[in-house]
Image: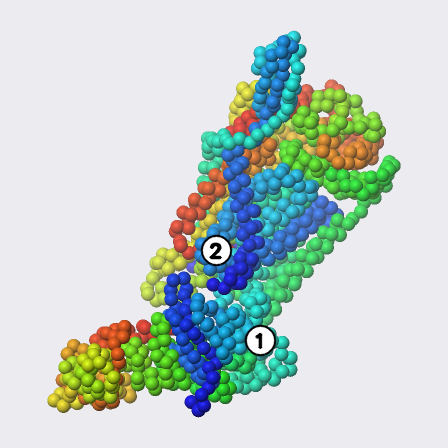
Amino acid sequence: MKNEKKNVVELRNITVKFDDDVILDDMNLSIKDGEFVTLLGQSGCGKTTTLRIIAGFVQPNSGDVLFEGNRINDVPAHKRSVNTIFQKYALFPNYNVYDNIAFGLRISKVPEPVIKERVAEMLKLVNLEGFEKRSVDKLSGGQQQRVAIARAVINRPKVLLLDEPLAALDAKLRKDMQNELKNIQRQLGITFVFVTHDQEEALSMSDTVVVMNEGKIQQIGSPIDIYNEPQNAFVADFIGESNILDGIMKEDFKVCLDGYDFKCLDSGFGKNEPVDVVIRPEDVDIVPEEQGMLTGEITSVTFRGVHFEIIIDVQDFKWMIQTTDEHKVGEKVGLYIEPDAIHVMKKSKYSGQFGDYSSYSDELDELSVVEESEDE
Amino acid sequence: MKIVKRLITFLVYAFLYAPLIIMVLFSFNSGRSTMVFEGFSLKWYETLFSNNVLMECLQNSLILAVTSSVIATILGTLAAVGVYRLKNKYISGTIMTVNNIPMMNPDIVTGVSLMLLFVFVGTFLGLAEKTNFWTLLIAHITFNIPYVLLNVLPKLKQTDKNLVEAAMDLGCTPNQAFFKVVLPQINPGIMSGLLMAFTLSFDDFVISYYTSGTDFRTLPLYVYDIVKKPVKPNIYALYSIIFILILLVLIINNFVLNGTSKKESSGRAKKVVSAILAVVILVVGVFAFKGCETTHSIDGLQAEYSREFEGTTLNVYNWGEYISDGSDESLDVIAAFEQLTGINVNYITYESNEVMYSKLKSNSDSYDIIIPSDYMIQRLKNEGMLQKLDFSQISNYKNIDEQYKNLYFDENNEYSVPYSVGMVGLIYNTTMVEEVPTSWTALWDERYSGDILTFNNSRDAFAIAQKVLGQSFNTENKADWDAAAELLKKQTPVLQGRVMDQVFEKMEGGNAALAPYYVGDFLIMQEENEDLDFVFPEEGVNVFVDSICVPSCAKNYDAAMMFINFMLEPEVALANAEYIGYASPNTEVVNHPDYSYKDNEYLYPAEEDMPNVEYFYDLTPEIRNYYEKLWVEITSK
Amino acid sequence: MNKGRSVKTTLLNAPYVVWSVIFIIIPLLMVAYYTFTANVEYYDISFSTADGTSYSYEIDGATVNNIEEAKEKALEQAGLSGETAANVTFSEAASQSRTEFTLEYFREIFSKDIGRAFGRSFLYSIIATALSLVLAYPFAYVLSRSSVKSQKMQMMLIMLPMWMSMLVRTYSWMNILEKNGLINNFLELIGLEPVEMLGTPAAVILGMVYNYLPYMILPIYTVMSKIEPSLHEAAEDLGCNWLQKFRRLILPLSVPGIISGVIMVFVPSISTFYISQKMSNGKIVLIGDLIEARIKNNYADGGVNVGAAMSLVLMVIIFICTIIMNKFSDDDGGNIAI
């Protein structure tokens, strides 16, 4: 960040309950002007609710919503200078493309010639020139997406809220739209608050990622921080693949795993404090058995194109390792880990829940994706 | 397989459309029959628009259907939005359950329950006259709302919730969001709800039957009511027009839809159709209005009346089809009276003495003139519900035949002026009976089994059995009634049916051999079927006199006297006698050279042919209830 | 959550809620009220004889025609006659009325005759419903499998007769079925014996089926048209023959439509009074006819109460039937809508 920017949106001690379910639990979040912030989490984690609080569709039970320093809890949605792009676009079926895009300006009684000019500008921005008269029902998913973007940004909002806008698109189109959204954000220089459950999307697009779970923020940071320095087992597991082991911090820069003392770069823990240790699969090298710090037997090998995914049973803990070398099931091998590959975390309530690949299967993974896409 | 499919489709359509085709066909019949096609003619269409009453009823139906469906659509749409927004599942569940009641409930229960409410409220608040439109409107709105709600609610649920949020997000207030975004989405639901409500309302008979009074009659009520003057081809003609119009709209609808849907959304096509529909309704409405505007001459009327009561409104409550109304170039009595005196007549009708009685009891300040039958006059007089008449203001009373004065129900001639006299007798088809019947027992004759009709009206049906048994009509001995009931039960196996208005069609069409009915109506039937003849059975017959009275609650006493006097004018009485077809107690009529029933042997039998006659007397409520229960026993066997 | 919003929701609901309470709930309570109360009219007669003895009687209004008769009856009850009777002075003689709780009307409808009418209505409407189903089901199936364009047109054609007055359509049937009606004329023409049709139970049932058939077709069709063509193909692909496909696929999926159709035909059939009256020549009396007749004929002296009692029982029967029917499906899909 060049010069320290002002907070455009601030959430302070926000709590939201639906009946007795706590959706957001004492949440605090500041969003800086011009930032691309992503709220990342599984369905039900409260990310969409956070977005709807900013938009004004949900009133928090307690806490303050600030917009450019002013409390806006009582400002209704239609008076807030934020705009939203909805998951299923919510284009008005009774209007054509032009009228959809012009909608916001017409509501604020902008003169028609100005509207014409600005709609044209928008259509150009989203590459939909010539589609003015088209009925929105007759557009493809990607085109609808573009209309939704144009309709929102034509109002020149300070903040644009995007609620899983790419979820309904196929993989290829999603990639293109990611780039396009990023470009639009850069061109317009407005703040984007983006909600997704797709960690890859979050990492590739955002300036800041907010990882949420169970109504609480787990970690806020740049994509690189989030990936490399996860704060707890949940974040570590949710972002990318990770082996998370129980370890004991013998002393600073020395952690014991499965009876082997590893050198590491972490310090500041108590003597012999139990900790969670995260080791990313790509950071483990497979070496001949006798050279390994730990030894185990390969139980599964899956070819993934760029690399192999290998599951190794080490004293009943299943490690996942990604390597470009081919190995065979049943082979006994050693594991070699550099100190900078080891990330030590304090124990948290998520300890022990994640990071073991003993029940790993592709199928389960896909199932959970399907569940997530059914939004809260 | 294909043949089976075709066959099923054909069968269903043949079944659904057969009666409609028959209806259209017979609307072109040159005769009055709806069973024998006598030749092609357009006369029923021609008379259609000059039939004031029919046109007024059509107009009423349209007014009612439009207002009730529009109000129901507004209320129902509001309610749908309300229910949709309700967070509390129990409240919305309860509302929806209540909403289902009018749909699940039989029409008759809905009708009866609303009637009870209106009667109850009417009695307690003493509501003013002319509330009939409002009760009908309320009833129709009530049964229409649920259909609107059920059409709109699913559309609301289908509407993407995010649309409203998107609109508000783009700066709409919640109201703007509703009108700009939600309304267009649910519009098809609202429109089909409106259409459905209109259809249901326009066609409703059962609920209207219970909630209407008599001064606002809708088309279905009119169709149901055609008792005295069967004009079915007329009705067929009207409904044929409606049928063809709707068919036309549907065909155009389909044509236009198919033509444009490829390019544009069907929205415009639907608008076109709605517009056509609206035009059609408008055209029919205008025709109806034109029909109502026809004026009738009062030439030949020599009477002079003062205009001192100009502008006052006189409420006249009479039997349906019981006054000359201007049809077939007759004198429009009401119009003539209005023209002469400047008094506005609010003319309302009833279908039976009992209906009139209960109306009078529950709605007591509404009527200036009533025309009840003998026994009902007795009851009203006994209960103090009649006023004495001022005969000094009724100079034409001198026209009344002496034999109709001082009758049992008004021994001192204080309360009533005879209007019309009738007798019951036996109508028979000469080609279907083996010998001329002379006794009521012919109605039990097994030789004519399946060809015998009788009254579908308890007291008239009992009367026949009572005469066979040699009883009086007015016995208060329950055993007598039991005996008569036994006899009536024995009649059931030989009966073709128990009918009232259907008797015209049955006898005219030669569908039945024997039927008891009123002599005036026999004359109408005979015009259609020369094989019919009439006899007063030897055991004796019922005679009735309907007389003009003024209820004690009348507000315009002097205007009422003027009206009574007018009704006794020779020309007026003649027109009425010609129209009604019953005997007239007015000597000026009986002796009038133009009177077509002059010296008619059935209406005015000679002294020696005069049958034994007996009047109905008013019976105690206990007896009335008793024979009604017996009647249920007889008919539900 | 948001107070302003909930106030608005209340305002939106208020008109209809008020309306339904006044014009749906209260009228039904009125039905119950009339069922269980009687308006008793009586005469209060007090008089004293010349010797100073005073008497006071309450004479039931149902047994006398007017106040004079009531006075006579009071004298009779006092055992006074002749000269003594002539010399009494009436201190009070007035017609009064009061509302009393009674089970009389309710008991009356459980009489054999009314019970029979209920039974007959039930039987006829069940037969009519079954016949409608038999006609409507294959028709709806064929309709749902025809081209979109044809479906649209046919839907209109099915609904068109509903625009015509029920009364007129019934009249028209009478012309066809009458003793000298079109069918018999035709039979005679080809040298066959005429058949008695009008006035038979079959005619009444035909009237019911005819009038309410569209109500059976529409919901079944609605449900069937929602069965995706691919489902048919899938069933065939899995080796179902026609019968199996019907039993395992079409029938279960069309149950909600059948149920709404059955209810929508059964309810008006069981309560009709016009159709039965006309198609049976007034010979077959259904419960609707009884309600109609009692209310019309002796409204003021108990008829309306008996009518209300019959309506109440009819309503309860129908609600029970509806609840039982709805047990067969938890989905109330297939509601009729244009």
Q: Quadrant of residue A37?
A: bottom left
Report the label total: 2
Residue A103 seen in the current view: yes
Task: Name the chain under label 2.
Answer: B
Residues at marks 2 and 1 on the same chain: no
| Residue named by callout 1 | A103
**Residue positioned 65% across, 13% down in the render:** C88
Q: Position of residue B352 (x, y in %)?
A: 65, 34
Using a 10 Å C-alpha cutoff, classify the residue at mark 2 as few (fewer than 14 neighbours), some (14 to 19) or many (20 or more): some
Element at badge 1? helix
Q: Is residue C127 above or below residue B281?
A: above
Which is more toward the observer, A44 or B285?
A44
The disc placed on residue B277 is none
Which is more toward the observer, A324 or A356?
A356
Q: Position of residue B212 (x, y in %)?
A: 63, 43
Element at badge 2? helix
Display coloring = rainbow
Using a 10 Å C-alpha cutoff, classify the residue at mark 1 as few (fewer than 14 neighbours), some (14 to 19) or many (20 or more): many
Q: Amino acid at mark 2?
A: Ser
| Residue named by callout 2 | B92
Asked if residue A376 lies left or right of residue B73, the reply is: left
Q: On the rendered image, what quadrant is the C terminus of chain C found in?
A: bottom right
The Cα–Cα distance between marks 2 and 1, rounded to whole angstroms, is 33 Å
